[in-house]
Image (tube, rainbow, N blue to C red):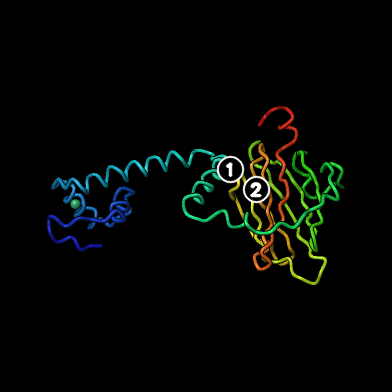
Amino acid sequence: MNTFSARNTHFGDGQWADFVRGTASPLDASAMQQHLDSGCPDCQASVRWLQQVVQSAAADSNLQVPPELTMGAVALFDRATADTGWTRRLKQIRAVLILDQPLEWQPAGVRAVSAPSSGRKQSYRAGDYTVDLTLEYPTDVAGEVVGQLGNTSSGSAEGVLVQCIQSGRPVGETTTNRFGEFILNFPARKRSTLRLVFRDQERRIDLPLEGNRRQLEVGGV
Ligand SMILES: [Zn+2]
């Protein structure tokens, strides 16, 4: 980076980023300071902009970003960059709810050390598949679904794409592990869809991912 030779040689944003964070070498920093002092408007603009970025990043690190906001941002990103509609065009395997009960009915387990939370345990059967879900609401804004996909035929349940769909778009996704297990966050106060995608079969299973019933009933949507 110590290549400053001419008075009118500009520096890149990457170099200016080091400069404003104070991580440029002293030699570079003094050359860059000289360049700034020479009055280059482009580089002065870069430095002003980067200083704002650094300041707002410092302020951001003091903030707790709500998961829902993050998920919204991810959704926006997807919207801009990806074809998010392809899973919707897959043929649907009809799912039947075979078990639905409050989480409190389950025997106390390891998770019981935390404050009692509302939640549900659900099981579905869909074609050759079984889907067991535990829905929990660890915070006001985020729900968590822990699931296991089983295959009653000889096929595998590994590597299946699992998506949380809101307003027709994925706001989060993961893949089942070799035991068919997955874990995914979803917006706690809204209804979304849990979608399991079987790419090679061009099929999907859609399940309702319910918001926190207590909050929905109290009107906390
Ligand atoms: Zn310049």
Q: Identify the residue at horizontal 42%, vertical 43% (top origin).
A: 57
Q: Say which quarter of the image contains residue 212.
A: top right
Residue 106 x %, y %: 86, 46
* Pointers 2 and 1 in contact (C-beta within 8 Å): yes
Q: Is residue 207 left or right of residue 109?
A: left
**Residue at mark 2 to residue at mark 1: CA–CA distance:** 8 Å
Q: Identify the residue at horizontal 20%, vertical 49% (top origin).
A: 33
Secondary structure beneath disc 1?
helix
Name the image quarter holding the N terminus. Answer: bottom left
Secondary structure beneath disc 2?
strand
Label 1 is placed on what type of residue? Answer: Pro
Q: In terms of depth relative to the viewer, which is nearer, 108 or 148?
A: 148
Q: Is residue 3 left or right of residue 68?
A: left
Considering every residue shown, the one lying at the far top of the view is 218
Residue 111 x %, y %: 77, 47
Name the disc covering residue 185, or none. 2
Q: Identify the residue at horizontal 63%, vertical 48% (top origin).
A: 165
Name the image quarter holding the C terminus. Answer: top right
Label 2 is placed on what type of residue? Answer: Asn
Q: Total of numbered circles in the picture? A: 2
Residue denoted by label 1: 67
Residue 78 x %, y %: 51, 51
Disc 1 beta carbon < 8 A from ligand 1? no
Examine the rendered structure and indicate whether residue 62 appears above or below residue 185: above
Residue 13 x %, y %: 29, 53
